[in-house]
Amino acid sequence: MPMKKPTTYNRQPTTSRGYTLVELIVAVGLFALVMLLASGAYLVMIGINRNVQGIATGIDNLSFALDTMTRTIRTGTDYSVGGTTFSVTNANGNRVNYSLLNNIIYQDSAPLTDPSVNVSSLMFYDYGTSSGDSEQARVTIIVSGTVSSGPGKTEAFTVETGATMRGTDI
């Protein structure tokens, strides 16, 4: 019987599949660094959002107080200004007083502003409210103070608004 020639296989050199320990350490380190930076930026954005929400809540509360005052002034009569106090007869014939006490704006004895709004100055200026003048009655309100934007943080504000009596008093 003739001898068979041994079969030879065309083998390629084997290469390792997978990653070395050094490659894994570098990849995990880079991933951790990227996640650390991303989470830091996320936490900063959450803090900024809380501050902005606090300011927006305070300013919304102040806006409500000013809207309440201007609505009463527009529909009211018989204005009386005393610097930081203001008195008006509303559309129902009731006397309404606005004042600043302990950094809170009050309508009679009810607070209009939240404790997060610290009002340091409330001034009323009236024009054309004297009897016999030829001007339409109007009132300018200037409010200054600070609003809480987070624990131990405040932002200053100054707001000016005006209201003119709807009916004529000329």
Image (cartoon, rainbow, N blue to C red):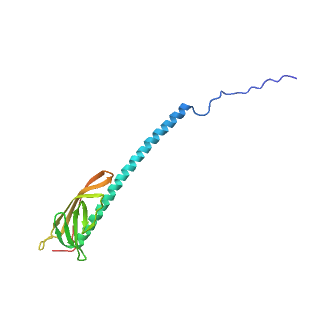
Number of labels in the image equals 0
Task: From the top left corner, tell me how far across and down residue 12 is, in percent.
Answer: 67, 28
119 in relation to 129, above or below: above
Q: Is residue 53 visible?
A: yes
Q: Is residue 158 visible?
A: no
Q: Quadrant of the C terminus?
A: bottom left
Task: From the top left corner, tell me how far across and down residue 113 is, in percent.
Answer: 28, 62
Residue at image position (84%, 22%) is 3
Task: From the top left corner, tell me how far across and down residue 10 is, in percent.
Answer: 71, 27
Residue farthest to the bottom, as pictured: 93
Residue farthest to the left, as pictured: 132
Q: Quadrant of the N terminus?
A: top right
Judge left or right: residue 57 versus residue 35. left
Task: From the top left corner, tell me how far across and down residue 105 is, in percent.
Answer: 25, 63
Residue farthest to the right, as pictured: 1
Residue at image position (34%, 53%) is 52
Judge left or right: residue 117 versus residue 83. right
Residue at image position (19%, 67%) is 86
